[in-house]
Image (spheres, rainbow, N blue to C red):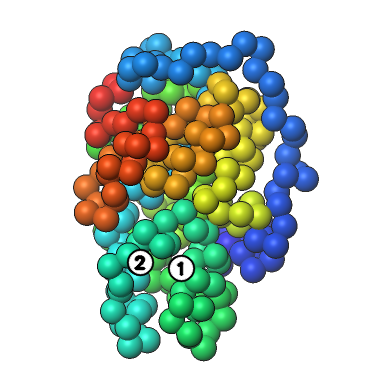
Amino acid sequence: MCITMNLTPRSQATARSASHRLAPLRPAAAEKPRPLSLDGLRPSSFAFDGAIFDFDGTLANSWNVWHQVDDLFLAQHGFERPADFSKQMAGRSFIEGARWVVETFRLKETPQEVCDQWNALGQRLYKTQVSLLPGALDYLHALKAAGVPIALATTNDPEVLSSLAHLIDFESLFDARLYGCDVARDKRFPDIYEAAARRLNISPASTVVFEDIPQGLQVASSAGFTAVGVLNEDPEQHQSEVRQAAHLTLSHWDQLL
């Protein structure tokens, strides 16, 4: 459940928006040009006022963990994971994904009970199987050293991510942290990116979003952000859709260092 760090449980938080706690988006004094190449994303020549990062699949190689969680959970209920399962779940918050699973597979559990099972499985697997993508942490530290404000915007649960405290210090590294339980709608809508921009006090037009799912890239772009697609080794990523939805794509973080 999304209850660590004094956050509200998912079952309650998803019923309301976090916008009442956040300042209005600050208009940019002058809109900065979108970069035509990766040069505008390098810390030494960064072309934006701030950056927003997804986590799973963007900064960390956690996709296999979630495929395992899905396989284990569905097997416990007598199902095999459908071929389009990952695509159906992409961008959904834990609670919205759980609602979809309960309805689709006609489960007896409540969505919150499904979330609890996913969280327990995820925490156990994260501790031993997840690592940061090569160059990701170096890039984040380079942006911080250059004075660029950065935010985390993930539909993941803070309890699950706390399993990676030995790899990354989320609280000190990110100037703002937004989880799926902090906004009313999931990444099929721009809410979490807009909320992150508010926390950083910057406008979408002067902010870049790094994301690995087509849905997130598309809505971020539609909301005025520059959307950078991060390609990874997940066989279920749908890279052609990522390329189509993003302004730019990168294959590894070392390209920006």
Please tell me which residue lies in front, 112 or 144: 112
Q: Which residue is mark 2?
A: 85
| Amino acid tagged 2 | Phe
Residue 211: % across, % down? 41, 40
Residue 66: % across, % down? 34, 63
- Residue in view at x 32 percent, y 65 percent: 84
96 to 191, vertically: above or below: below
Q: Residue furthest right?
A: 20
State whether residue 221 appears in this view: yes
Q: How many marks?
A: 2
Q: Classify residue 79 by image quadrant.
A: bottom left
Q: Which residue is mark 1?
A: 119
- Residue in view at x 46 percent, y 54 percent: 91
From the viewer's perspective, tell me whether residue 84 is left or right of residue 197: left
Tag of residue 46: none
Q: Classify residue 90 by image quadrant.
A: bottom left
Residue 132: % across, % down? 31, 44
Nearest-to-viewer mark from 1 and 2: 2
238 to 163, vertically: above or below: above
Residue 127: % across, % down? 33, 60
Q: Secondary structure at mark 2?
A: helix
91 to 172, vertically: above or below: below
State whether residue 173 appears in this view: no
From the viewer's perspective, tell me whether residue 198 is left or right of residue 164: right
Please tell me which residue lies in front, 66 or 82: 82
| Amino acid tagged 1 | Asn
Q: Secondary structure at mark 1?
A: helix
- Residue in view at x 35 percent, y 62 percent: 86
Please identify the quadrant where the C terminus is shown.
top left
- 10 Å crowding of disc 1: few (<14), some (14-19), many (20+): many
Label 1, label 2: how many angstroms apart (C-alpha)?
Answer: 18 Å
Q: Classify residue 14 by image quadrant.
A: bottom right
